[in-house]
C-alpha cells in the first residue's frame, strides 16, 4: 500500500533529554523519521525538550516545539496544531508512553488523531507484564518462569516446579533488600523466609535464575501487509545478568549453531507477528548455553538503542523504514537505499564482525559503584567493524578513549595470578581487561569461562591476541607476521612495542564497504571501515564518483560521555551540511553508532573507525582531502590537532598553534597579559607539598585540576589543606607525573560566550549567564540567554575581551569563552577555540546558524558578508533557560552535589517571553516537581557553614510559599533565630527518628543540601542526597538553584497556562 | 592456536587467469569446480553438504567458518558435498555444547578442500560483476611456467556427474501408513525429515526408477527434489515426471524438481550471472502479496513457462525472477527456493502447508 491519503500532518514525539538508557540513538531515529516523513511531503510537528539534538532543528520539521515533555503539553500542542496523526514508535520509551496515555484516555479519538506505528493493543501486549506473559504463553514462547508467593511452602513448591537456582525478590523493600540468589534448597529456605519477613506485605517473587545464559537479540521489522524480516542478530559477550546496554555486543551472533539461530529467529518473528507490530521491534532472548532451552526476556515494539546499533551494523535504516511503514508503505515498496535497486524486504547479510563497546562515566564518578547488573550505567558506546572479532575488539578499545591501544590495562598488568583470579568474580566495567590479563597470565579459558560465563569462543579469540603479543615478541618481525598483526587490529606502535623492532614498511589500511548484502549487489553506500586487504573499495568509490569538488574531512566526537555529548554531533552534522552546501565533498570519520553523523547519508562518505592518529592516517591516505576540520568534534577531534599539524595536514579554521596557545597555560597567560585581561591567579604544581604551599599563598578556596583537563574531569574546589591533600593523593595514585593546576577560586557570576570569528571580526550571537555562581561546572549550571543581570558596562567589557581574545588567538570559526564576574570585574576562566555544548541551543534560539557561518569562515568568507552583522547580535525577544538533567538514579553511590566536575548527562530548554516563565518551563522539562500546593509539604535544609547566612533569605521564601521547613541542629537554630520557623531534625547517628526517616515519610517536596565535602559515599551528607534520589525528591545542591526554584514557585505558574513556542517561527 | 602457524600455502586459479593466494585447510588435493559465493552467515555444515553445491568451489562471504564446530553424522544434508570452500578465517577453537568436532578435521574426512586467508569480499565482488566461473585450487605454487597448463586444465574441466545419478537403492523411513515418494535428484535431508515430521513415511527413490514402480508404493503424494544436475542427460527423468503428473497424485517440486516441472510446462532453463545463494532471499507470493525471506542455493532459473500449463505463483522480490509455479493440468506446485520445514511454528513461505492441503484435497 502506498502513502495513506488520510495522513497529512504528523506529530512526532521525541525522547527528551539524554539520560542513561535513553540517549542519542533517539535523535538518530527521530531525525531519520522526520526526514522520511518530510520526503513524502507531510507536514511534521515535533515536540522534544532536548535542544542539543539535530531533530529539533528547524530543517527537520515544519513546527518545532522545544517544550517540556509532559502529557499536558503534548495535549496542548495537539490542540494548537491539530495534526491528523501521531507517531508512537520513534521517540523511545517516552514517545511510546505518551502515545499510549493519549490513546487510552480517548484524547486522540476525541481530537480525530490517528495513532501511527505501534497501536494500543501492541503496546499493551509488549509492555504490560501480565498481558505480555499471557500472550507469550498463548503462542508457546517461554518467558522466565516466576511466581509471587506469600508463604515459604508455596515458594518451595514452585522451586520444585522450575528447579534451582532461583532469584528471590521481596516486595516493597528498598533497593532489593532481603533478596538474593539461591543455589540450594537450604539457601532458598533461608533467603525466602528472610525476604518474607522483610517485606511489609509478606510477599516475595520467586524467579528462575538465568544469569549466565547467553543473551541474544533480534531486530525485526514488519509492515501492514504482514511482511516480516529480521534485520540483524546480536549476541552479548557478557551473558545474562549484565544489562545489554552495559554489555559488549557483537553482530551477527557468532556462537549459535544453526538450530539455535533458527529457533530464536523464528521465535522473534513469531512474537512480532503475534504482537501485530507495524514498524521496528526488538526481541531479547536468554539461551541456555548447553541446551535448547530459551526464554523471552523483553520485547520493545519501537526503535531502540539496539535498533540503532543494528542499523549501523548492517547499513539497514530501521528508523526510516519504520517511519515509512507507519504512513502506509510496505517493505516490498520501500527501496533499499543502500543498493538502490533492491527492496527493504530482505534480510541484510554481513561479511564482517561488528563489536559494540560501552562507554562509562566512572572516570568522573570515582566513588560510584562500578558493578554492572540489570541497571544500565553506560552513557554512550562505540561501534567497530572488522574482518575478525579480534580486529573489531582492538578497534573498539581504541575508539572508546580509555587511553589504551590494546587490552593490557596497567592496573591488571600489575596484578598477580591470584589477584586476577579473585578479581574475575567482579562483574564491572573493566572485567574484559581483567579477563584478558587472566588469560595472559595462564588462567585457563575453561576456568575464566566457569567464573564469568563468557562463551569460550570469545575467550579463545581474545587469546589469539595474546598469542600474537607473544609471537611478536618472539623472533624477527617478518612482513607476514606484521600483516597478521595488522589484521588482528594491532597499531604500528603497539607492534613496535611488543616486538621491540621498528616497523620497516608500515602499511596503510584499505577500506571495505558496508552494503547490507555482503557484496551480492553493487551498492552505492559511501560507508566504509578499515582493514588490511589489497583492494580498497573507498579509493575505487572515490575514483568512480570523481568530482572536481575539494574534499574536506570532518572528525566526529566519538562516544557520548559526560562532558562530550550529543551537542558535538549536532555541530559535526551541521558542518557537513554546510560543506555540502558550499560545494565541497564532506567526509566524516566517527565511531559512535547512536548518532546522526554516522548515518551513511549524512556526509558524502563515512568512515566508521577509531580516531587515533594511525587510524586517521589511513583515511587521509585514501581520501587525500584538501583540508580537515577538528573544531566540531569535541576534545576527541581537537586531540588530533597537533599530530595533523606536524604531518602538514591543512587544518581548516583556527590553527593548531592557536589551539595550543589556548591550552598551554604559560602561553595563555602571556596572551592574557598582552591583552590586559585578568584571570584568577594560579600556579602549576607536581607534588602534594607544593600544592599545599601554593594553595595557602593564593588563599582558600582554590580550584584544583589536572593539566590535561577535559570537561571538568577530576576538578575540585578545596576549602582547606586537608582537601588539597586528599585530592593530591587521589590524583597521584591515578596518574603519575601529572601537573596539577591550582587557581584562586572566585565565587562570582559565571558568564559564557560563544563567538564566531573570521580572523578579524567577530560575532557574538548571545551572552549567557549562569544561575549558579562559578564553581559549578558550566554544563551543570542553569544557563540563561540573554543574560538577565549584567550591566551595560559588564557587557561592553565582555564584548571587548571576546574580541581581543578572538583576534589575538586568530580564531577562524568558533570560540567558547567562560568568564567570571567578581566584584564587578570580569575575569577569564577558560577559552576553547572550538565548538561548545551551548552552540545548538544558542543557534536555535537566536536563529544564527553558528556552525554554518563558522564553516564558511574556514574558507575565507567574511562575517560582514553573512548578514548577521558583527559584535553582539541583537538580543532575542525570547528568553531561553537551559537546565541540566542528571542520571543519578542509575549511578549508585554517586554524590549528587554539584561542583566543578560535570555530572549531568543531558539538558532541556525552557523558552518563553519572560525569564520567569522560561525558567519555570525549563525546570518542569527537567523533571522538577513544581508543587502547586505547599500545604503539608516540607523543605529540608542542611547546608555547610559558609552557606548559612545566605540560606536565611531562601528559607524565608519557601516559608512564605507555605512550606514547612526542616533543618538539622545548627541550621535550624540559625533559621529560628532569624524568625524563620524551622523544625529540628536529628542527623544520621543522632538516634531515631532522624533525617532519613523524614525523607522516607513522604512529607518533603524539596531538599536543599550543600556540604563542604562530599564524594565519599560513607559521608552522611552524601547518604542524605542519595536517599533523596531514591525517593525521587528534587535535591538542590547550590543555593542559587534553590533561590531560582523558590522564585519560580512564587510565580504560581501552571504548565497549562504557559505559552508554547514554535521555534521555527522565532 | 594460530591457524597460520605451519599452514601450507594453497592457491586459487580462476578461469580468467587471476590467482588468489591463501592457505590450506581440510583436504589437501587439487580440485576443480565452479566458483560461486554464498552469503549465509550460519549453517556452514549444511551448506557444504547441500547436494546443490556438488560441483561448487564455495566462497563463504561471512569471514568466520566453524565457530560452533560440526556435529558428526547428524547435521549433514546429504552424502554429497561442495568440492571446496574458500574463507577468510576458520576457527580451530569452536564452542557449542552440541558440537562433536572441528571444521578442519571434518573437512578432511569429508574430502572437502579448503582455502583460507583470502579476501572473500574481493572475490565475491568479482563473481558478482563478471559472473560465476570455473576455477581450481592447487597446492603447488602457480608460476608463469605452469599457469598456462593449469588454465588449460580448468578450461578442459567439464563438471562432476551428480552423485544421485549413480544411486540405485531406495531409502524408506517408516512413520505411518501414509506415504510420500521422494524422487531423488539430489534430495536434501531436511525435505525428508519435514515430511516425516508431518506424519508421512518417505520412500526416497532413485531417479532411474520408473514412474510405474514409484506409484506401486501407493504414495499419497510425490516430491521431486534436487539441486545440481551438471551436464547429465535428464530426458529419462523428464519422462518419468511427465508420467507421474498423469497419476493424479499431488506433486511438489523443489529446486531441480521445480526446474524440470517448469520445462514440462513449456519453460526453459537459464543460467544466472551470480545466482541466488544465501539465507536472505526475498520471495513474493503473488496471490497474497506477502513477501517472505527464504534460503536459496541455485544458479539456474525457469523462464517462459506456457501460461496455459502453469501459473507463476512466486517471484523473487529483487530481480522478479520465477520462484514458484502452480500447474493447471495436474495437482501440483513447485518452488525454486528451499521451503521452511519446521513444524509447530509459523512458516512464512507456507509451502508444506499448501502441499498438505493439496494432499488432503
Image (cartoon, coloured by chain):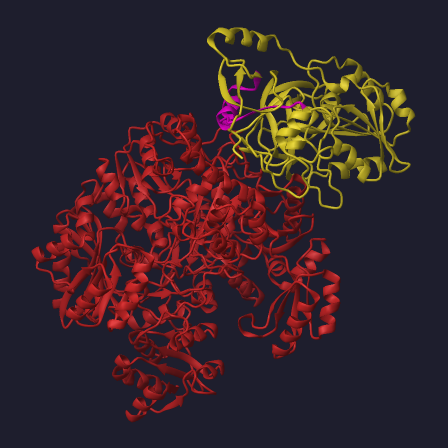
Say whether residue B116 is magenta.
yes
Name the one closer to the observer, A27 or A242: A242
- The residue closer to the viewer here, A259 or A814, is A259
Q: Quadrant of residue A843?
A: bottom left
In this picture, residue B268 sits left or right of residue A800: right
Range of residues picked out in magenta = B111-135
Instruction: Locate the N terminus of chain B by quadrant.
Output: top right
Say above or below: A600 vs B185.
Answer: below
**Residue at position x 40%, y 58% from top?**
A361
Relative height, residue A715 to residue B357 (above, below): below
Tell me, what hue is chain A?
Answer: red
Closest to the observer, A843 or B46: B46
Q: Position of residue B48 (x, y in %)?
A: 65, 28
In the image: residue A150, left or right of residue A1044:
right
| Residue A15 falls in image quadrant | bottom left
Q: Is residue A318 visible?
A: no
Assess whether residue A999 is covered by the magenta stretch: no
Q: Colour of chain B?
A: yellow
The image quadrant of residue B68 is top right
Residue A433 is left or right of residue B257, and the answer is: left
Picture coordinates of residue A552, whole percent (x, y): 29, 37
How far from the left and from the top, in percent, is residue A792? Answer: 13, 68
Above/below status of A688 relative to A608: below
Is residue B198 visible in the rendered image? The answer is yes
Q: Quadrant of the C terminus of chain B?
A: top right
- Vertically, is A208 above or below B138? below
Asked if residue A923 lies left or right of residue A332, the reply is left
Amino acid at each position: 500500500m502506498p502513502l495513506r491519503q488520510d495522513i497529512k500532518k504528523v506529530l512526532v514525539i521525541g525522547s527528551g533529554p539524554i539520560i542513561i538508557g535513553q540517549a542519542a540513538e533517539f535523535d538518530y531515529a527521530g531525525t531519520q523519521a522526520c526526514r522520511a516523513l518530510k520526503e513524502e511531503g507531510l507536514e511534521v510537528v515535533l515536540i522534544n525538550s532536548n535542544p542539543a539534538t539535530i531533530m529539533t532543528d528547524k530543517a527537520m520539521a515544519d513546527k518545532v516545539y522545544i517544550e517540556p515533555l509532559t502529557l499536558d503539553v503534548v495535549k496542548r500542542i495537539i490542540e494548537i496544531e491539530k495534526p491528523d496523526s501521531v507517531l508512537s514508535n520513534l521517540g523511545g520509551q517516552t514517545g511510546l508512553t505518551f502515545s499510549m496515555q493519549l490513546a487510552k484516555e480517548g484524547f486522540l479519538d476525541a481530537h480525530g488523531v490517528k495513532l501511527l506505528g505501534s497501536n494500543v493493543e501492541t503496546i499493551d501486549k509488549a509492555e504490560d507484564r501480565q498481558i505480555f506473559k499471557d500472550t507469550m504463553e498463548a503462542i508457546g514462547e517461554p518467558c522466565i518462569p516466576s511466581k509471587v508467593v506469600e508463604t515459604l511452602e508455596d515458594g518451595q513448591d514452585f522451586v520444585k516446579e522450575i528447579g534451582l537456582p532461583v532469584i528471590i525478590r521481596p516486595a516493597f523493600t528498598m533497593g532489593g533488600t532481603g533478596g538474593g540468589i539461591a543455589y540450594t534448597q537450604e539457601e532458598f529456605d533461608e533467603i525466602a523466609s528472610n525476604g518474607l519477613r522483610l517485606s511489609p506485605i509478606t510477599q516475595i517473587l520467586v524467579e528462575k535464575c538465568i544469569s549466565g545464559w547467553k543473551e541474544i537479540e533480534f531486530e525485526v521489522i514488519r509492515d501492514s501487509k504482514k511482511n516480516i524480516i529480521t534485520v540483524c542478530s546480536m549476541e552479548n559477550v557478557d551473558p545474562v545478568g549484565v544489562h545489554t546496554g552495559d554489555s559488549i555486543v557483537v553482530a551477527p551472533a557468532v556462537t549459535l549453531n544453526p538450530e539455535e539461530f533458527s529457533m530464536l529467529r523464528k521465535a522473534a518473528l513469531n512474537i512480532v507477528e503475534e504482537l501485530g507490530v507495524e514498524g521496528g521491534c526488538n526481541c531479547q532472548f536468554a539461551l541456555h548455553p548447553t541446551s535448547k532451552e530459551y526464554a523471552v526476556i523483553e520485547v520493545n515494539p519501537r526503535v531502540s538503542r539496539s535498533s540503532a546499533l543494528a542499523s549501523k551494523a548492517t547499513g539497514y535504516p530501521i528508523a526510516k523504514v519504520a517511519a515509512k511503514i507507519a504512513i502506509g508503505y510496505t517493505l516490498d515498496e520501500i527501496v533499499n537505499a543502500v543498493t538502490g535497486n533492491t527492496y527493504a524486504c530482505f534480510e541484510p547479510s554481513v561479511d564482517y564482525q561488528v563489536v559494540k563497546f560501552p562507554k562509562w562515566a566512572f572516570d568522573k564518578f570515582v566513588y560510584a559503584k562500578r558493578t554492572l547488573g540489570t541497571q544500565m550505567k553506560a552513557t554512550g558506546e562505540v561501534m567497530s567493524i572488522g574482518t575478525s572479532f579480534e580486529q573489531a575488539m582492538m578497534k573498539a578499545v581504541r575508539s572508546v578513549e580509555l587511553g589504551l591501544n590494546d587490552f593490557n590495562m596497567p592496573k591488571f598488568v600489575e596484578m598477580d595470578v591470584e589477584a586476577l583470579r579473585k578479581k574475575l568474580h567482579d562483574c564491572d566495567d573493566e572485567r574484559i581487561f581483567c579477563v584478558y590479563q587472566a588469560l595472559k597470565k595462564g588462567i585457563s579459558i575453561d576456568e575464566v569461562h566457569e567464573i564469568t560465563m563468557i562463551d569460550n569462543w570469545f575467550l579463545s579469540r581474545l587469546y589469539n591476541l595474546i598469542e600474537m603479543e607473544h609471537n611478536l615478541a618472539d623472533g624477527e618481525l617478518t612482513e607476514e607476521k606484521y600483516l597478521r598483526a595488522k589484521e588482528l587490529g594491532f597499531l604500528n606502535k603497539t607492534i613496535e612495542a611488543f616486538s621491540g623492532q621498528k616497523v620497516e614498511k608500515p602499511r596503510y589500511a584499505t577500506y571495505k564497504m558496508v552494503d547490507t548484502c555482503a557484496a551480492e549487489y553493487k551498492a552505492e553506500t559511501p560507508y566504509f571501515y578499515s582493514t588490511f586487504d589489497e583492494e580498497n573499495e573507498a579509493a575505487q568509490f572515490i575514483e568512480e564518483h570523481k568530482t572536481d569538488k575539494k574534499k574536506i574531512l570532518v572528525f566526529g566526537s566519538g562516544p557520548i560521555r559526560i562532558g562530550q555529548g550529543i551537542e558535538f554531533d549536532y555541530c559535526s552534522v551541521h558542518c557537513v551540511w554546510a560543506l555540502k552546501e558550499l560545494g565541497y565533498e564532506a567526509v566524516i570519520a566517527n565511531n559512535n553508532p547512536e548518532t546522526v553523523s554516522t548515518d551513511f547519508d549524512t556526509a558524502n562518505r563515512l568512515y566508521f573507525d577509531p580516531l587515533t592518529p594511525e587510524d586517521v592516517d589511513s583515511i587521509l591516505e585514501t581520501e587525500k582531502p584538501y583540508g580537515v576540520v577538528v573544531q566540531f568534534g569535541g576534545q576527541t577531534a581537537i586531540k588530533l590537532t597537533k599530530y595533523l599539524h606536524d604531518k602538514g595536514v591543512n587544518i581548516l579554521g583556527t590553527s593548531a598553534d592557536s589551539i595550543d596557545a589556548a591550552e598551554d597555560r604559560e602561553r595563555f597567560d602571556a596572551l592574557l597579559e598582552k591583552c590586559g585581561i585578568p584571570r584568577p591567579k594560579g600556579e602549576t604544581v607536581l607534588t602534594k607539598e607544593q600544592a599545599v604551599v601554593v594553595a595557602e599563598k593564593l588563599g582558600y578556596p582554590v580550584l584544583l585540576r589536572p593539566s590535561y583537563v577535559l570537561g571538568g574531569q577530576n576538578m575540585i574546589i578545596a576549602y582547606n589543606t586537608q582537601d588539597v591533600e586528599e585530592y593530591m593523593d587521589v590524583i597521584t595514585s591515578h596518574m603519575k607525573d601529572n601537573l596539577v593546576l591550582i587557581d584562586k577560586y572566585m565565587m562570582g557570576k559565571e558568564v559564557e560566550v560563544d563567538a564566531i570569528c573570521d580572523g578579524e571580526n567577530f560575532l557574538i550571537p548571545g551572552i549567557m549567564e549562569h544561575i549558579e555562581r562559578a564553581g559549578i561546572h558550566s554544563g551543570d549550571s542553569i544557563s540563561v540567554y540573554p543574560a538577565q543581570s549584567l550591566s551595560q558596562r559588564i557587557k561592553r567589557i565582555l564584548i571587548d575581551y571576546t574580541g581581543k581574545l578572538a583576534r589575538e588567538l586568530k580564531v577562524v570559526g568558533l570560540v567558547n569563552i567562560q568568564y567570571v564576574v567578581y566584584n564587578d570585574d570580569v575575569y577569564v576562566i577558560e577559552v576553547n577555540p572550538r565548538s561548545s555544548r551551548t552552540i545548538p541551543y544558542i543557534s536555535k534560539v537566536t536563529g544564527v546558524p553558528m556552525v554554518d557561518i563558522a564553516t564558511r569562515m574556514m574558507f575565507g568568507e567574511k562575517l560582514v558578508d553573512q548578514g548577521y552583522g558583527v559584535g553582539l547580535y541583537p538580543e532575542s525577544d525570547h528568553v531561553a533557560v537551559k537546565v541540566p538533567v542528571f542520571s543519578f538514579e542509575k549511578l549508585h553511590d554517586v554524590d549528587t552535589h554539584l561542583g566543578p566536575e560535570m555530572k549531568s548527562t543531558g539538558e532541556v530548554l525552557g523558552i518563553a517571553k519572560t525569564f520567569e516563565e522560561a525558567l519555570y518551563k525549563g525546570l518542569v522539562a527537567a523533571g522538577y516537581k513544581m508543587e502547586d500546593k505547599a500545604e503539608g509539604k516540607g523543605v529540608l535544609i542542611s547546608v555547610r557553614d559558609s552557606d548559612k547566612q545566605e540560606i536565611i533569605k531562601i528559607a524565608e521564601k519557601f516559608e512564605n510559599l507555605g512550606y514547612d521547613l526542616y533543618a538539622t541542629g545548627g541550621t535550624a537554630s540559625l533559621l529560628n533565630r532569624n524568625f524563620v520557623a524551622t523544625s529540628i531534625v536529628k542527623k544520621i547517628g543522632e538516634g531515631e527518628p532522624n533525617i532519613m526517616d523524614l525523607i522516607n515519610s513522604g512529607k518533603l517536596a524539596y531538599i536543599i543540601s550543600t556540604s563542604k565535602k562530599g564524594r565519599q559515599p560513607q559521608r552522611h551528607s552524601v547518604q542524605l542526597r542519595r536517599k533523596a534520589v531514591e525517593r525521587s525528591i528534587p535535591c538542590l545542591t547550590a543555593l542559587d538553584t534553590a533561590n531560582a526554584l523558590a522564585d519560580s514557585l512564587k510565580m504560581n505558574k501552571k504548565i497549562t497556562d504557559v505559552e508554547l513556542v514554535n521555534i521555527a517561527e522565532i | 592456536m594460530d591457524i597460520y602457524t605451519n599452514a601450507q600455502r594453497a592457491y586459487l586459479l580462476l578461469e580468467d587467469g587471476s590467482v588468489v593466494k591463501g592457505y590450506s585447510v581440510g583436504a589437501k588435493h587439487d580440485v576443480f569446480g565452479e566458483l560461486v559465493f554464498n552469503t549465509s552467515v550460519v549453517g556452514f555444515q549444511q551448506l557444504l553438504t547441500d547436494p546443490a553445491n556438488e560441483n561448487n568451489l564455495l566462497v563463504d562471504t561471512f569471514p568466520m567458518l566453524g565457530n560452533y564446530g560440526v556435529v558428526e553424522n547428524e547435521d549433514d544434508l546429504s552424502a554429497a558435498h561442495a568440492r571446496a570452500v574458500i574463507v577468510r578465517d576458520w576457527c580451530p577453537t569452536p564452542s557449542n555444547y552440541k558440537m562433536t568436532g572441528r571444521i578442519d578435521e571434518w573437512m578432511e574426512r569429508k574430502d572437502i578442500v579448503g582455502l583460507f586467508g583470502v579476501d572473500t569480499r574481493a572475490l565475491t565482488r568479482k563473481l558478482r560483476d563478471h559472473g560465476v566461473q570455473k576455477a581450481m585450487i592447487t597446492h603447488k605454487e602457480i608460476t608463469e611456467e605452469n599457469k598456462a597448463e593449469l588454465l588449460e586444465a580448468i578450461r578442459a574441466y567439464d563438471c562432476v556427474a551428480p552423485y544421485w545419478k549413480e544411486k540405485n537403492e531406495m531409502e524408506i523411513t517408516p512413520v505411518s501408513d501414509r506415504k510420500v515418494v521422494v524422487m531423488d535428484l539430489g534430495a536434501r535431508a531436511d525435505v525428508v525429515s519435514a515430511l516425516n515430521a508431518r506424519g508421512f513415511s518417505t520412500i526416497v527413490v532413485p531417479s532411474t526408477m520408473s514412474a510405474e514402480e514409484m506409484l506401486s508404493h501407493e504414495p499419497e503424494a510425490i516430491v521431486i527434489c534436487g539441486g545440481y544436475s551438471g551436464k547429465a542427460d535428464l530426458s529419462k527423468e523428464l519422462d518419468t515426471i511427465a508420467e507421474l503428473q498423469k497419476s493424479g497424485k499431488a506433486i511438489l517440486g523443489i529446486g531441480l524438481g521445480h526446474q524440470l516441472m517448469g520445462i514440462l510446462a513449456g519453460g526453459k532453463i537459464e543460467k544466472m550471472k551470480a545466482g541466488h545463494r544465501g539465507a536472505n532471499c526475498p520471495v513474493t507470493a503473488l496471490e497474497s502479496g506477502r513477501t517472505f525471506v527464504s534460503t536459496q542455493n541455485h544458479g539456474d532459473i525457469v523462464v517462459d513457462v506456457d501460461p496455459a500449463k502453469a501459473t507463476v505463483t512466486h517471484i523473487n522480490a529483487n530481480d522478479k525472477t520465477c520462484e514458484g509455479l502452480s500447474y493447471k493440468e495436474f495437482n501440483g506446485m513447485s518452488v525454486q527456493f528451499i521451503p521452511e520445514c519446521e513444524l509447530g511454528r509459523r512458516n512464512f513461505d507456507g509451502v508444506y502447508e499448501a502441499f498438505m492441503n493439496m494432499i488432503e484435497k
